[in-house]
């Protein structure tokens, strides 16, 4: 079952909800709780949790506070939680005043009124030292009355120190924290800062530092299951780890909006899904001062670890100004230092998903590279079954407008064209509603309306397959065939053959391959008896689908012959290359050859790359189709072929993987580099399998 999670701030959750939703950062939690258990009345184990924005600092601190309230072993502590942003704290005295105000809100109900009166009285004190002393006195009085120690949970300690102008504030805070064991400070910070790093500063060596690193794959998997309320494979979570950089908050956003979606659907609609959280990304950007925002956006556009000079040139700032703004962004946790040298550091946006979101929304060229990366990740981390290829074939190759154009400009034709447009926009429910409207308005009893209804039924059935409603699609196709299977006019012939193709595809998806093969053979036989011209996309699609069924039936030689027939007849058709049909037939051929332990020829390899480029996107099965041949070639040879191909921009992770193997430098986004490392692992597996296969063939 999915647990309750507020959009961005776990501070709104109850203790029970905090405990139920806490599934990562458990090692850090155990460390903090153990230090509190072991402390005695003469020591104060102050701790500081450091991690970038969204890394889980707030959730961790609140989980510790909940444990203190729930665990009898920790009954000698009383947690006092600051707000995530303490905007009113600008002096040392105001820090202690804020402690008292928070205690008035969170203390025992019977004492809150008196504590509030004390707080209101001390608010009028103007001398800051007197204010600090009197607030500390009131806090210690409370601790003595209840024989407890106050656990102060203070968020964003680094930003708080930036907002306090008093240069002695560190020493003024250190004195009571170091000498008074009734105070224990558990703080958080988005990055390390001078007060704790510089030996000359007051807070040096005061805290035990706990750094929150990005979640690993297993932790991302645990968080996904906790938020989404359903299991998912580790392989499917890996790309989400890459896109979010293992950031719990960003992964939570994706888990919440993708809980009921398949991995493929989630990835393919990532921009639209994340668009629902535009206010989160906008608020993050709008909170930055103007010059910091300028530098931040320049780094987002670069989308790779970049030096100060690179960023300054794009932001149109001098390097010293840019360096100062980068320092502030690092302190905020909005930017991280990613490699380089001490003199030439490289920077990267901390919240990777924001970078992806920004580039996709900006749409000035880089968006196509991002989209290609997402498509490649879908292929790599969601290995395609033959059924996936069938569904994708219908989606990418089936031209919904062809049948509708036969209707003409009448009302039914207009409705069908509107439905086609909605379908291409991904508004599937609206498209089905319009198809149903045509079926209802132009159904039985309307003269000359049969063709309109047939087109609506056929297009609807194709869409039903994509929506996973294949059984409904079969019934719908049978309704079409009952009226048009024997007709000989052009429109009816195209319609009946299309219905047989769609029905066969639906039968294939519901695992009835023998019946699917019969449907495809009937369609092809009908084509042979017709004088009417059938569009090439239908003929090529029929042969491709038949070949896929033969693969499912383990008739691999016949499948290869069918794929070759489709390629020979229709593979060079420009329209079929543009809609992806040619590439998908070549992919299917490569997958079958791999089952024989063979790879596609270099000629077919080049043809596939050219066809992918003409289609403009990576198709299901691309990764599995390319990997065996790339693994069989020398890395330098494979790299040269890929870089020279028109599909190079679609296969950047594969190219980067080969560059990594050859020790070549590649300036790419961290997301691309991480996918490339996984590609290298796949290539290594393929090479090991090929070596084993050759050894077996050579054995006596």
Image: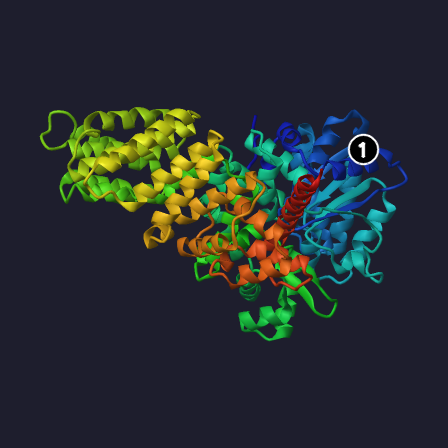
Locate residue 402, reporting x and y percent.
Answer: 24, 44
Residue 238's x, y, as percent? 61, 42
The answer to whether 203 is drawn above or below residue 58 in the figure is: below
In front here: 662 or 515? 515
Query: Residue at (9%, 30%) from the top-left corner?
Result: 447
Q: Is residue 445 left or right of residue 461?
A: left
Which is more toward the observer, 406 or 159? 406
For residue 536, say whether it is visible.
Answer: yes
Residue 231 located left or right of residue 440: right
**Residue 579 image offset from top left, x and y in percent:** 36, 49
The residue where tag 1 is placed is 148
For residue 587, side relative to residue 635 (left or right): left
Q: Quadrant of residue 695?
A: top right
Label 1: how many Cα within 10 Å (few below 14, some 14–19, many 20+) = some
Secondary element at image label 1:
loop
Residue, far bottom: 318
Q: Which of 15 and 334 is in front in this view?
A: 334
> Which quarter of the rendered picture does the N terminus lie within?
top right
Q: In this view, does 15 lie above or below 590?
A: above
Q: Is 340 located above or below residue 592 in the figure? A: below
Q: Quadrant of residue 501?
A: top left
Quarter where residue 168 is shown: bottom right
At 22% from the left edge and 29% from the top edge, which residue is drawn? 485
């Amino acid at each position: 079952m999915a647990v309750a999670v507020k959009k961005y701030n776990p501070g709104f959750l109850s203790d029970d909800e905090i405990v139920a939703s806490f599934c990562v950062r458990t090692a850090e939690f155990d460390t903090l709780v153990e230090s509190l258990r072991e402390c005695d009345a003469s020591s104060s184990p102050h701790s500081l949790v450091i991690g970038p924005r969204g890394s889980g600092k707030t959730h961790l601190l609140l989980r510790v506070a909940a444990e203190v309230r729930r665990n009898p072993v920790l009954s000698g502590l009383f947690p006092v939680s600051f707000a995530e942003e303490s905007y009113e704290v600008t002096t040392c005295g105001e820090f202690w005043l804020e402690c008292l105000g928070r205690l008035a809100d969170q203390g025992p109900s019977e004492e809150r009124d008196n504590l509030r009166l004390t707080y209101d009285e001390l608010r009028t004190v103007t001398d800051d030292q007197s204010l600090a002393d009197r607030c500390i006195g009131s806090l210690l009085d409370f601790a003595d009355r209840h024989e407890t120690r106050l656990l102060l949970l203070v968020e964003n300690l680094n930003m708080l120190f930036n907002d306090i102008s008093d240069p002695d504030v560190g020493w003024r805070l250190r004195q009571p924290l170091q000498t008074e064991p009734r105070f224990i400070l558990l703080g958080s910070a988005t990055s390390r800062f001078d007060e704790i790093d510089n030996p000359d500063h007051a807070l040096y060596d005061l805290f035990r530092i706990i750094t929150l690193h990005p979640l690993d794959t297993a932790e991302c998997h645990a968080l996904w299951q906790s938020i989404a309320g359903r299991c998912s494979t580790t392989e499917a979570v890996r790309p989400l780890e890459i896109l979010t950089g293992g950031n719990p908050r960003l992964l939570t956003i994706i888990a919440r909006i993708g809980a009921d979606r398949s991995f493929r659907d989630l990835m393919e609609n990532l921009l639209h899904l994340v668009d629902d959280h535009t206010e989160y990304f906008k608020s993050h950007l709008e909170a930055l001062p103007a010059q910091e925002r300028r530098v931040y956006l320049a780094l987002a556009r670069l989308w790779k670890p970049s030096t100060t000079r690179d960023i300054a040139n794009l932001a149109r700032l001098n390097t010293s100004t840019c360096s100062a703004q980068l320092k502030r962004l690092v302190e905020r946790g909005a930017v991280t230092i990613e490699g380089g040298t001490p003199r030439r550091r490289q920077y990267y946006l901390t919240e990777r998903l924001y970078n992806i979101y920004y580039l996709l929304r900006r749409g000035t060229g880089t968006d196509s590279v991002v989209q290609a990366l997402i498509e490649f990740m879908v292929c790599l981390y969601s290995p395609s079954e033959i059924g996936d290829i069938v569904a994708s074939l219908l989606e990418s190759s089936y031209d919904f407008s062809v049948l509708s154009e036969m209707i003409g400009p009448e009302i039914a034709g207009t409705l069908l064209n509107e439905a086609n447009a909605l379908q291409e926009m991904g508004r599937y429910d609206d498209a089905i509603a319009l198809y149903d409207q045509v079926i209802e308005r132009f159904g039985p009893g309307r003269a000359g309306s049969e063709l309109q209804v047939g087109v609506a039924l056929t297009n609807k059935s194709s869409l039903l397959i994509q929506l996973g409603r294949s059984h409904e699609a079969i019934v719908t196709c049978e309704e079409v065939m009952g009226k048009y299977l024997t007709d000989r006019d052009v429109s009816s012939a195209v319609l009946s053959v299309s219905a047989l193709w769609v029905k066969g595809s639906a039968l294939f998806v519901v695992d009835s391959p023998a019946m699917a093969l019969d449907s495809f053979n009937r369609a092809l036989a009908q084509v042979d008896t017709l004088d009417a011209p059938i569009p090439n996309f239908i003929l090529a699609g029929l042969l491709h689908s038949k070949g896929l069924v033969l693969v499912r039936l383990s008739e691999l030689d016949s499948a290869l012959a069918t794929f070759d027939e489709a390629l020979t007849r229709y593979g060079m058709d420009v329209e079929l290359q543009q809609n992806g049909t040619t590439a998908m037939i070549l992919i299917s051929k490569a997958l079958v050859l791999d089952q024989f332990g063979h790879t596609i020829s270099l000629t077919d390899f080049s043809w596939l790359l050219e066809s992918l480029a003409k289609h403009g996107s990576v198709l299901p099965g691309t990764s599995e189709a390319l990997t065996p041949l790339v693994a069989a070639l020398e890395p330098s040879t494979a790299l040269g072929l890929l870089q020279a191909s028109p599909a190079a921009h679609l296969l950047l992770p594969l190219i980067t993987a080969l560059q990594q193997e050859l020790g070549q430098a590649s300036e790419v986004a961290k997301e691309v580099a991480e996918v490339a490392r996984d590609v290298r692992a796949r290539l290594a597996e393929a090479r090991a399998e090929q070596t084993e296969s050759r050894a077996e063939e050579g054995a006596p």
